[in-house]
Amino acid sequence: MKRTPGKGVDVKVDNVIHEYGDLRVLDGVNMDIAAGETLCVLGGSGTGKSVLVRLMAGLEVPTSGEIQIGGMLVPEYAALPPDEKPFLVSMVFQHSALLGSLTVEENITLRMREHRTHSEKDMHSICEQVLDEVEMGGSNNKLPGELSGGMKKRVALARALAVNPDLLFYDEPTAELDPVLTEQIGLLIARVRRDRPITQVVVTHDMVIADIVADRVAMLGDGRIAEEGSYREFLASPDPGTRSFLEAARVLTSRDQADNKDKTGKDG
């Protein structure tokens, strides 16, 4: 099936519950993501953000509820042969997930090699293009062990872009990075947002990333989406849980909290 590349697809999460034994991690998540939108799912550690993105990507199956991408249920999409998929989904994993025995170029082109979709010449050309896109040109023959943490994140993004996805998931893309590298990765994601009309879903606890890349943010708490809106609306939220998260992230100071209390006559 010939597909139109890079147009973006919508995502619909309908009353998703997910449990590990007696532990209910997600408790009725509902969320709609528009085609071409970059959404940041925010929340603290242990709130189920990574679980949610893995469910959306089809790496796990929810206990109950449904997830659709591009109008298709995720299991139905996953069951299609590669050449029959009407759109492509890719993912940047939290710890990059590069194969240490393969070079950068071999990591980036692995999916194409497995499915024999491109010639050697075309794969090399695609690799050069995406490495330039993430500012890693010339690193084709390096091994992951020769790369810094920030470089590995860039290569992981290049690998995700190499298949020309319509939907791109990021699981904590700035984990373990310092503030300078965090901003750099955020700017790369923002560049993807600008240059490719695809859908991006970024799960993160990092407000710097949300500020740089998000069209919209969604706050995950107590197993549900507590609220959604623009980044500016999120900063002005009166919700106590959101205010506590923002203060912990040092986006709000204690003085901000006190000012908000003065204005509303109550905490938060």
Image (spheres, rainbow, N blue to C red):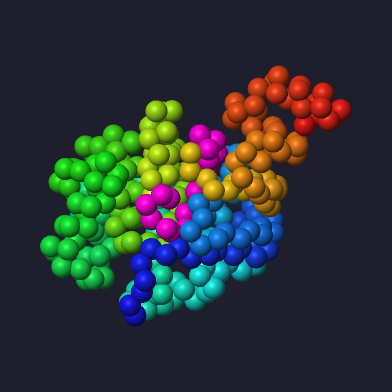
How many numbered marks does the figure carry?
0
- Is residue 29 found inside the magenta-colored segment of the image? no
The single residue placed furthest to the front in the displayed view is 194
What residue span does the magenta drawing correspond to?
193-211
Q: Nearer the viewer, residue 37 or 224?
A: 37
Q: Is residue 153 above or below residue 178?
A: below
Classify residue 251 by image quadrant.
top right
The single residue placed furthest to the left in the displayed view is 121
The single residue placed furthest to the right in the displayed view is 265
Residue 176 position, x and y percent, is 42, 34
Residue 266 position, x and y percent, is 85, 29
Q: Horizontally, is 62 left or right of 178 in the view? A: right
The single residue placed furthest to the top in the displayed view is 255
Question: Can I make out residue 59 in this image?
Answer: no
Give me the residue at 43% from left, 50% from top.
193
Classify residue 184 by image quadrant.
top left
Q: Nearer the viewer, residue 194 or 33?
A: 194
Give me the residue at 33% from left, 36% from top.
150
- Is residue 210 found inside the magenta-colored segment of the image? yes
Give me the residue at 34% from left, 49% from top.
157
Give me the residue at 38% from left, 63% from top.
6
Residue 265 position, x and y percent, is 86, 28
Question: Can I make out residue 84 in this image?
Answer: yes
In the picture, the quarter occupied by the N terminus is bottom left
Q: Is residue 196 above or below residue 239?
A: below
In the picture, the quarter occupied by the C terminus is top right
Q: Horizontally, is 9 left or right of 16 in the view? A: left
Residue 211 position, x and y percent, is 53, 38
